[in-house]
Image (cartoon, helix red, strand yellow):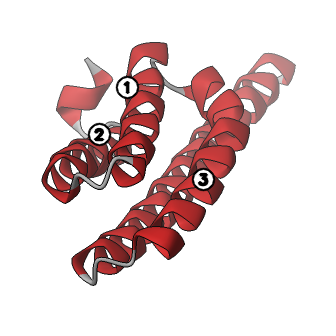
């Protein structure tokens, strides 16, 4: 009977940890997606000053969050998003809105991908 109780307790602990990881990664991805959308809005208005300031803030926030996200996800995906954010900043500094929007889309797709990878469906389990 003790073994059954221990097995159930371990199963519940694993389920709780999985749920916490899912909600954390989802919340972080949503937060960064919203911030990139705000950046896109500033870039559409050709407000390079505020866009650059927000992009630097975004880059710092990503650097802080990426350490934790790296532990939970595949390292390459997290690195690619960080590189995209850095390139977005460079494109703002060089006044290249077309290049900025291309990189912005790449970063948003990367964030959506890491969020989708956390869903408990069959293809993510395999």
Residue 107 seen:
yes
Q: Between marks 1 and 3, how big is the CA–CA gap?
A: 17 Å
Residue 11 seen:
no
Which residue, given by chain and number where applicable, does mark 1 sit on? Answer: 80
Q: Identify the image quadrant of the C terminus.
A: top left
Looking at the image, which residue sits at the far front? 94
Looking at the image, which residue sits at the far right? 2
Give whichever of 114, 78 is nearer the camera.
Answer: 78
Give whichever of 53, 72 is nearer the camera.
Answer: 53
In which image quadrant can residue 125 be found? top left
Select label 2 or label 1 by which is in front. 1
- What secondary structure is found at the residue carrying circle 3? helix
Which residue, given by chain and number where applicable, does mark 2 sit on? Answer: 110
Q: Identify the image quadrant of the N terminus.
A: top right
Give whichever of 36, 87 is nearer the camera.
Answer: 87
Select label 1 or label 3 by which is in front. 3
Q: Between marks 2 and 1, how big is the CA–CA gap?
A: 8 Å
Select label 3 or label 2 by which is in front. 3
Looking at the image, which residue sits at the far bottom? 45
Name which of mark 1 and mark 3 comes first in the sequence: 3
In the rendered image, the vertical position of residue 33 relative to residue 75, given as above or below: below
Horizontal and vertical percent for residue 81? 40, 34
Which label is found at residue 56? 3
Tags 2 and 1 in contact by the CB under 8 Å rule?
yes
């Amino acid at each position: 009977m003790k073994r059954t109780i221990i097995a159930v307790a371990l199963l519940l602990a694993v389920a709780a940890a999985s749920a916490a990881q899912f909600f954390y990664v989802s919340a972080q991805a949503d937060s960064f997606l919203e911030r990139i959308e705000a950046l896109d809005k500033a870039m559409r208005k050709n407000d390079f000053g505020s866009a650059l300031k927000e992009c630097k803030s975004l880059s710092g926030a990503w650097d802080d969050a990426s350490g934790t996200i790296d532990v939970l996800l595949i390292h390459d995906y997290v690195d690619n998003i960080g590189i995209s954010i850095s390139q977005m900043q460079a494109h703002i500094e060089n006044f290249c809105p077309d290049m900025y929007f291309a990189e912005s889309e790449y970063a948003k797709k990367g964030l959506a991908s890491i969020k989708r990878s956390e869903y408990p469906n069959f293809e993510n389990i395999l």
